[in-house]
Amino acid sequence: MFNHKVAAGFPSPADDYIEGRLSLDEHLIQHREATFFVRAKGSSMAGAGIFDGDLLVVDKSLAPQSGDIVIAVLDGHLTVKRLVHRGGKVILKPENPLFRELELKEGQELTVWGVVTSAVKKFI
Amino acid sequence: MPLALVDCNNFYVSCERVFNPALENKPVVVLSNNDGCVVSRSNEVKALGVKTGGPWYQLESLAKKHGIIAYSSNYALYGDMSARVMSLLSTFSPKQEIYSIDECFLDLEGFDPQSLLEYGQTIRQAIKRGVGIPVCVGIADTKTLAKLANHCAKKGLAGSDGACDFGRMNEAQRSDLFARIPAGEVWGVGPRITHRLEALGIHTVEDLRTAALERMRDQFSVVLERTVQELNGTPCIELEDAGAPRQQITVSRSFGSPVTAFEDLAESVAYFATRAAEKLRQDGSVAASVCIYIRTNPFKEGEPQYQRSLIVPLAQPTDDTLKLVAAAIQGLRASYRSGLRYKKSGVLLMGLQPKGSVQPTLFDDPEKQLKSDNLMRVMDTINRRIGQGSLTIAASGINQRWSMRRERKSPNYTTAWNELPVAE
């Protein structure tokens, strides 16, 4: 005990009210082990509020649903698009009229790399 | 006591493939330090007959012919992916022993024995989906058998895809399977023992399993006797809890080109001590002594050879980078000889114990200790935030002339903000 510094004076009246500070990790990440960060490039998803350079929070463990924004594997590369099931067809839909939809052909298999759960943008 | 051994398939190659899906179905290897040897191979490369540990320069014509893609080891990536896999796996059992960077044992005591194989498949899917790494699962009553079951799962020797439960087989089926596997595949049976076993007519796992215990003990060792008992389902090797902190921490590297100057060697040693100290603080431990070692290249014939290791005890166990580096440099100063071409150096932290358990002495200054703790925390935070090695002590050098060759390294996809994977 001789090792301890003795605090003089009264304890702070706020001590009893201290709670854990809010953490963005806690807010944005549901599955810690399965969550990866991916950098968005280009403007194909501008309509969904995703712009060049945005940080995408991607959860690999979630089962992709129609309507989700996903990271998919296209010709060996990662791409960010909206996943849409329409009339028995699987479509990767850009959110920008300047880009074309991509419809999966018969027998073509789509690999969804992960589901985008949020995008982070920095202003400074 | 059923337990599972979960092992990642071609782990380093699999890590590269997660972030570069174009590598899927292509022949890929990962090379060791200094791009010297093959340390991880994709199945396509295994099919070409390339062995682990083979020197890369000997493979260059084969690589060209088959379009083998080679990567330098990316330890930051593999370390992070391993931590993710292990953490996810820990949710499948109350007790986990992490055996290496890419394999761990899980205790399955108390689980329904009839559904362990399905549980194995659940584990495989969860890891593949969550982290993107393919794994195989071997289930049996002892560690040695679980290892063997994993081998069977990997090679597809026992039916089910990627998972194998010896508990699901009857005696005759197991004997039949073991008779088809060479004894050398058993955990702990190395090439030398395999050779000696063969002289005794013991060729297969089944031969070894049915060998007389006393004979194994007398002619080999109690270790091999234990292995035979384990092959018969008697547990002899305990599951060690993951909670047990490491006993020592090593950071060492071979140099890209030989180093002669004391200053360059000191830079490397200071850098290794810095990295080791970070690991130490991550574990929440302190070290009682620092061991440094240096050596020349034993493969360079005609060059003067020298190697030396030296243990420097610390006055008080510590996790302070500055003190650990100072001790390492002190050790180096006493071991260094000029005029030699050094190939490798390393730092070991020994006598590790949990930080809270250290007896304070009368000479401790709590104020100073607090300052040191704060400084270390700031160093770790900054290095975590803007990339390993951003903030370092001046002794570990800025140019790092000694640093190893890693010409084909992939980006640090998960540990550096400016190297994240990109999606268009």
Image: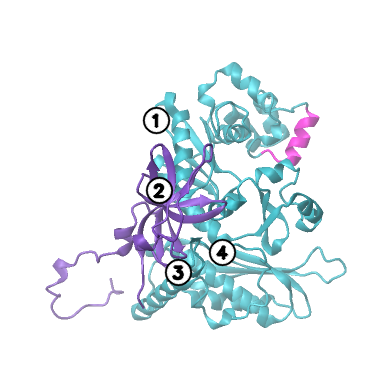
Q: From the viewer's side, name the closer residue of B21 and A94.
A: A94
Q: Are marks 2 and 3 on the same chain?
A: no
Amino acid under disc 4: Pro
Sequence-first disc among 1 and 3:
1
Q: From the viewer's side, name the closer residue of B63 and B142.
A: B63
Q: Is residue B240 visible?
A: no
Sequence-first disc among 3 and 4:
3
- Visual hue assigned to chain B: cyan
Q: Is residue B144 visible?
A: yes
Amino acid under disc 2: Leu
User: Which residue is found at the position 16% from the left and 70% from the top?
Assistant: A15
Task: Name the residue that disc number 2 marks.
Answer: A83
Q: Are marks 2 and 4 in contact (CB under 8 Å)?
A: no
Count of numbered tags: 4
SS for tag 1?
A: loop
Q: Label 1 vs label 4: CA separation?
A: 41 Å
Q: Which residues are magenta?
A: B189-200
Eyeballing the image, is B77 above or below B324?
above
Residue B198 painted magenta: yes
Task: Name the residue that disc number 3 marks.
Answer: B384
Q: Label 2 vs label 1: CA separation?
A: 38 Å
Chain letter for mark 3: B
Between circles 1 and 3, the one closer to the viewer is 3
Give the overall secondary structure of the magenta segment: helix
Q: x, y percentage for residue B182?
A: 71, 31
Amino acid under disc 1: Phe
User: Which residue is found at the position 49% from the left and 70% from the top?
Assistant: B418
